[in-house]
Image: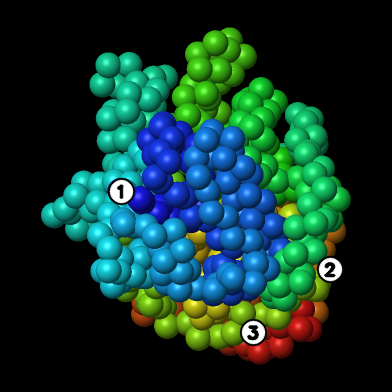
Amino acid sequence: MKILRLLLGDQLNAEHSWFINTDANCIYLMAELKQETSYVTHHIQKVVAFFASMRSFAAFLKEQGHQVHYIKINNPENPHELKALIEQQIEQTAAEKFEYLLPDEYRLDKQLEAIASSLSIPSASFDTEHFLTSRDTLKNFYKGKKQLVMESFYRMMRKEHDILMVNDQPEGGSWNYDQSNRKKWKGTPSIPPALEFSKDISGLYKEIQQADIKTIGSLHPNTFNWPTNRDESLQVLQYFIENLLTHFGDFQDALHTDQKFLFHSRLSFAMNSKMLSPKEVIHEVLEYYNNHKDTLDISQVEGFIRQILGWREYMRGIYWKEMPSYALTNALENKNPLPGFYWTGNTKMNCLSHAIHQSLEEAYAHHIQRLMITGNYALLTQTDPNEVDNWYLGIYIDAIEWVEITNTRGMSQFADGGIVATKPYVSSANYINKMGNYCGECHYDPNEKFGETACPFNALYWNFLDAKKEHLKSNPRMGMMLSLLDKKDEGELDKLRKRARHIIENPGKY
């Protein structure tokens, strides 16, 4: 039986069981579709990275002896839409069966379900063999429980996969070293330079330009630094383990104007495209730790593994438990437009300027830049979560909806009403000043609430608490701050409201 198998751009798993044996009757289909470049406006580096990685993967499969039909972006026969593509290829290959790997995005999952049911030939779907959990693991784990708490899920995962465990107890005596992972980086210890590949992708870049794909952000076509095949992805992993892991946990929340990446791994694109698996990343980290316990503290290792074994799998579980309604949640009823400077970085607020410029230049920002700078400001200005979602989904190289929307709409914007986060992650300038040096070179003073040089975050913070107090009054974690709000003099509170309103209505002036 001749089989046509579809591979999506984030299904580049060379270790998948599909590829163990070659079969002359099996054809793998891969295509660069405008359907996938236009549902939001993506960063140019994101489009380049996916196309380059797909092309590398297709070449790998061919080298292994597999048959591959690869359709590039400017192929005149490219229909640029998934249903038309599959129907076209079934006809051209005379396929007798259609198979695909389960997508990680709800929209593609439903689209492929519909396409498969409409075909005149039988079809089947298969697991991507990437994640450590199934789509339903989290839903089943929390069945009957009123509240979802990541920590309990994380502990279950530690036990189930026997990671950093001694019998049934956590190695080192603690499940979580988060309290040790909040240090401010002040110039020491020194940070090794980022691993660079400096590849020339100018040919692919020209093809994307010719295809008239609308993108955001910048690109240096002669020095592209993201991994676009498995060998490069493994290099990034080993470089992180050997050079950065030793201080990752300590400074994972730090912010600094001179350092874009600090000790972060930048493995997320390689993992989310499935060039690396979470299992092998965790295994390599643990192997290195077990051989270097004299120099590598468990807090660094646990802090990293928690992000993958705990948070990454947890967010995917939330996604499949809550979709499709999750994409419509707006519990705080925020409706304001996203400030225009999110697309340019042109703002006098130094923290936002740095985080946004870095995002436009690198297609990357680490989690605290996303959560407590760009996300914090969007929430404090009561921005429509749909607009925030579209920005995050487009600008970051690792943003695929299953991981982006739960982190953005849930963790960052509290639009889900508390499914992911137990409280809104908002702060005044105090937190930003505490975790980095952004405030030291800023036009605004983090200690002032009023006046031309007062940091906008301060008025916006108290205004947000005031505007949303009815939504938050039953939240036990907000009790202390709402109590402080109640004690504020009405005159001061009125001045804070007026300044916040001016900031929200005139973002271009700030």
Q: CA distance from mark 2 to mark 3?
A: 18 Å
| Screen quadrant of the C terminus | bottom right
Quadrant position of residue 113: bottom left
Name which residue lies at 58% across and 70% down: 78
Scheme of image coloration: rainbow
Residue highlighted by disc 3 = 504
Q: CA distance from mark 1 to mark 2?
A: 68 Å
Query: x, y (%) of residue 169?
Result: 30, 21
Query: x, y (%) of residue 465?
Result: 48, 74
Amino acid of disc 2: His
Quadrant position of residue 110: bottom left
Q: Is residue 289 visible to us here?
A: yes
Instruction: Mark 2: give few (<14), some (14-19) or many (20+) Cα within 10 Å.
Output: some
**Observer-nearest residue: 479 or 165?**
165
Residue highlighted by disc 1 = 1
* N-terminal-most mark, 1 or 2: 1
Q: Does dot 2 land on a helix, a strand or a loop?
A: loop
Pointer 2 with pointer 3, Cβ within 8 A: no
Q: Is residue 247 visible to us here?
A: no
Residue highlighted by disc 2 = 443
Q: CA distance from mark 1 to mark 3?
A: 62 Å
